[in-house]
Amino acid sequence: AQKVTQAQTEISVVEKEDVTLDCVYETRDTTYYLFWYKQPPSGELVFLIRRNSFDEQNEISGRYSWNFQKSTSSFNFTITASQVVDSAVYFCALRIYGNKLVFGAGTILRVKS
Amino acid sequence: DAGVTQSPTHLIKTRGQQVTLRCSPKSGHDTVSWYQQALGQGPQFIFQYYEEEERQRGNFPDRFSGHQFPNYSSELNVNALLLGDSALYLCASSPRGSPYEQYFGPGTRLTVT
């Protein structure tokens, strides 16, 4: 079965704190893609990153960084020095065959000033 | 460059009625996917259209049907609406040659009363 688990339902932090959003996935396939999307209150899902199963290099983009570990089937997302504008729902997703994305339940991030 | 557009933004229907939602993909995109996002949950894949044919389908009943037009735009039709069909319906388009990259529209909020 293919499944994505985001155990953190909601996280609240104060501005400038670092925060890590956890994502654990399940798949029997050896080739797959992992994604992170941000959903602000407007509702539109905003693409953040795609990682394929053969690339375990961590990636940093500005204040965002991603830690992919196949050994623990995790693809965690860290925001450094969080800002109020980072407040949103964040989804981790898995693509295994075709182009169907399997999403986790999402983590609500609230950044307070 | 316009992003993915969806219409209408909001819709209220009564149980048993039928509804049609519309999606226009980004320029240069030829694949359209539809997702249903219930309140507080992650998006669930409904189906995907490519070359005017349904290419892949999720676990949704036949009441959910779709169509893709020669200009790559797409419609999602839902018949015999149930209260449980109330959700945000998201459309995603993918560029030619990269069907696993999905760019989402703002969604249509459907309320069934």
Image: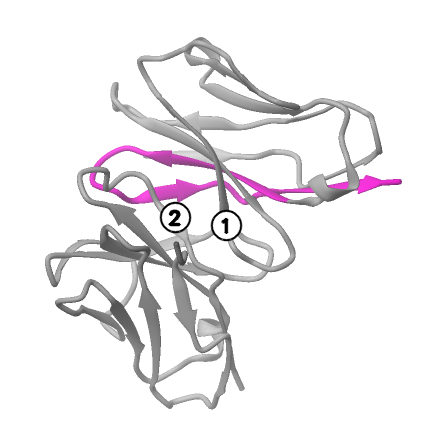
User: To which quarter of the image does residue B54 belong?
Assistant: bottom left
Q: Quadrant of the N terminus of chain B?
A: bottom left
Above/below status of B4 relative to B21: above
Q: Magenta-highlighted stretch: main secondary structure?
A: strand
Q: Quadrant of the C terminus of chain B?
A: bottom right
Which residue corresponds to mark 1? A45
Residue in the picture at 61% in, 33% down: A7
User: How is the structure coloured here?
Assistant: one colour
In the rendered view, does B18 fall on the left or right side of B82? left
| Residue furthest right as drawn | A113
- Residue under the image location 39 percent in, 27 percent down: A26
Residue nearer the viewer, A72 or A34: A34
User: Where's residue B45, x and y in %?
Assistant: 34, 53
Amino acid carrying mark 2 in the image: Tyr
Vertical arrangement, residue A65 with respect to residue A106, above or below: above
Q: Residues within 10 Å of mark 2 (few under 14, many from 20)?
A: many
Whether residue A99 appears in magenta in the rendering, the answer is: yes
Chain label for disc 1 = A
Q: Using the numbered discs, state the Cα–Cα distance from disc 1 to disc 2 in whole angstroms.
A: 8 Å
Lateral position of residue A46 relative to residue A94, left or right = right
Which region of the structure is painted magenta?
A: A89-113
Report the amino acid beneath label 1: Leu
Residue B89 at x, y = what percent? 43, 65
Residue B103 numbered tag? 2
Which chain is mark 2 on? B
Q: Is residue A43 above or below residue A108?
A: below
Dot 2 falls on a residue whose secondary structure is strand
Which mark is drawn over residue B69? Answer: none
